[in-house]
Image (cartoon, grey):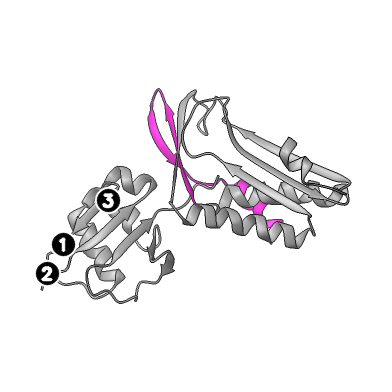
């Protein structure tokens, strides 16, 4: 079954990719790390910002780690470094 | 401020700070506009956490944070922070603390637009050092 993720981006990531994207990876992804890698392949211009040391992953308004398991259909958000207020 | 003061019954001290968009950017060039991106829920949550922790830490009667988002022009206000307490040291420290933490922890993304183009900015070393004072 094809996985489709509802992705939201903020700040410079929104500029580089888009505000919201329905993303179907080329091959199945099992966790956040794999989703990042798939995104970096699709959006090479945002590769640096998509790296784990540059952006955080948020699911259900909670920050999740690289090993967080994904099944497809989740709404996943990526936060670049915050500027603060 | 008037409304905040009206609710500060019995307090001996009120303090507030207003942050204003500077006309010069981080690189020294003239800023034509700023854009503040935010998250629909987590931005407010991050601000509320900063406010609530200040109320607890400084034994405040009350504290408020109001922060704009979206497009902001030079010389426009961006943020307003206020605190009330029985004595002045608490409110002065609380406002200072809340601002230092807002500059590094609040979930905003800030883009400066200049004649040379737009760029997203991150907290400076000075911002981080200032926030470290309260750790």
Q: Is residue A12 left or right of residue A30?
A: right
Give the residues drawn in magenta, as a range: B107-135
Residue B34 at x, y percent in the picture: 46, 32
Q: Quadrant of residue B49?
A: bottom right
| Chain of the residue under label 2 | A
> Do callouts 2 and 3 point to residues on the same chain?
yes
Using the rendered image of the protein, determine whether residue B134 is visible from the camera's viewpoint. no
Q: Residues within 10 Å of mark 2 (few under 14, many from 20)?
A: few
* Quadrant where the C terminus of chain B is found in the figure: bottom right
Name the residue located 35 percent from the left edge and 72 percent from the top edge. A66
Name the residue located 56 percent from the left edge and 30 percent from the top edge. B21
- Say which label, 2 or 3, has the lower sequence index: 2
| Chain of the residue under label 1 | A
Residue B44 at x, y percent in the picture: 53, 53
Label 1, secondary structure: give it: loop
Tag shown at residue A2: 2
Q: How many marks?
A: 3
Q: Residues within 10 Å of mark 3 (few under 14, many from 20)?
A: some
Check disc 3 and report the residue beneath it. Answer: A20
- Say which label, 1 or 2, has the lower sequence index: 2
The reply to whether callout 1 and callout 2 are in contact (CB within 8 Å) is yes
Q: Is residue A16 magenta?
A: no
Q: Is residue B118 above or below residue B63?
A: above
Tag shown at residue A24: 1
């Amino acid at each position: 079954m094809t996985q489709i993720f509802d992705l939201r981006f903020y700040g410079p990531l929104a500029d580089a990719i888009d505000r919201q994207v329905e993303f179907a990876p080329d091959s199945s992804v099992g966790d956040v790390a794999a989703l990042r890698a798939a995104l970096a392949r699709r959006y090479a211009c945002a590769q640096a910002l998509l790296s784990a040391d540059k952006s955080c992953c948020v699911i259900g308004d909670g920050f999740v780690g690289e090993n967080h398991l994904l099944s497809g259909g989740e709404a996943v958000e990526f936060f670049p470094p915050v500027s603060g207020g | 401020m008037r409304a905040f003061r009206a609710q500060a019954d019995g307090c001996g001290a009120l303090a507030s700070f207003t942050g204003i968009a500077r006309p010069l950017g981080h690189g020294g060039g003239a800023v034509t506009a700023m854009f503040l991106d935010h998250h629909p829920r987590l931005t407010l949550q991050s601000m509320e956490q900063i406010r609530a922790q200040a109320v607890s830490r400084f034994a405040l009667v009350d504290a408020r944070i109001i922060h704009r988002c979206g497009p902001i022009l030079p010389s426009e206000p961006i943020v307003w922070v206020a605190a009330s307490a029985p004595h002045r040291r608490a409110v002065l420290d609380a406002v200072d603390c809340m601002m230092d933490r807002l500059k590094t922890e609040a979930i905003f993304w800030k883009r400066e637009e200049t004649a040379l183009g737009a760029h997203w900015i991150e907290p400076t070393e000075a911002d981080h050092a200032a926030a470290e004072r309260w750790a």
